[in-house]
Image (tube, grey):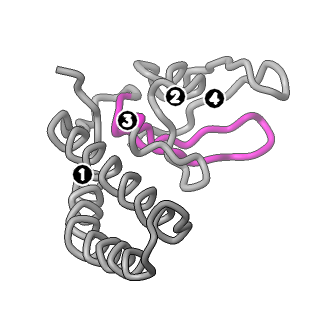
Amino acid sequence: MDEKYISQEGLDKLKKELEFLKKDERIRVAEELQTAISFGDLSENAAYDDAKENQAQLEARIIEIEKLIHNAKIIKHQKKGWVEVGSAVLLTDGKTESAYQVVGEEEANPIEGKLSFKSPLGAALINQPEGAKVRVETPRGLMEYKIIRIS
């Protein structure tokens, strides 16, 4: 089994997306396909080709989400005094402070402050206590961060 670490919030989001895709999107894509078929000759029907492509992408996404849900391992963060998957951390590079949550790969979104535990910074933070300094190679060069707070 290929476990995927995810928060309860992330799992709920996936379930909601799956329900939307199976109900609303499948109906919309089926209608799109029927409209394209009504145009006649399928051999040179760009609308039909587009609708079939949309259908294939939709079904692929549904399968992907179903696998993620099946393999999901819910993160149960326990405030242990060190960084683990599920921890919220406040870091400083000596100039600015940044807040992140360490999450599984499926939820990672740096814009939202969610770092994968497998990303360079996420991996460096794992098992580190408050006050620890970590070094990470970034596109801007070697960066050093100090963990100010873990929650």
- Name the foreground residue: 36 vs 13: 36
Residue 122 marker: 2
Q: Earlier in the sequence, mark 3 or mark 1?
A: 1
Residue 75 marker: none
Contact, mark 2 vs mark 1 (Cβ under 8 Å): no
CA distance for labels 3 and 1: 11 Å
- Name the foreground residue: 28 vs 117: 28
Q: Which of the two discs, 1 and 4, sits closer to the camera?
A: 1
Residue in the picture at 19% in, 40% down? 74
Q: Which residue is mark 4?
A: 146
CA distance for labels 2 and 1: 20 Å
Residue 104 marker: 3
Farthest residue in the right direction?
140
Q: Earlier in the sequence, mark 2 or mark 1?
A: 1
Residue in the picture at 50% in, 64% down? 50
- Residue 91 percent coordinates (x, y): 61, 38
- Residue 82 percent coordinates (x, y): 38, 26
Q: Earlier in the sequence, mark 2 or mark 4?
A: 2
Q: Is residue 18 above or below residue 28?
A: above
Contact, mark 3 vs mark 2 (Cβ under 8 Å): no
Q: Earlier in the sequence, mark 3 or mark 4?
A: 3
**Which amino acid does the dot numbered 2 rest on?**
Gly
Q: Which residue is mark 1?
A: 11
| Residue extent of the magenta highlight | 84-105
- Residue 128 percent coordinates (x, y): 46, 20
Contact, mark 3 vs mark 1 (Cβ under 8 Å): no
Could you tell me which secondary element the residue under label 4 belongs to? Answer: strand
Could you tell me which secondary element the residue under label 1 belongs to? Answer: helix
**Which amino acid does the dot numbered 1 rest on?**
Leu
Residue in the picture at 25% in, 45% down? 63
Q: Is residue 125 above or below residue 106?
A: above
Residue in the picture at 36% in, 60% down? 55
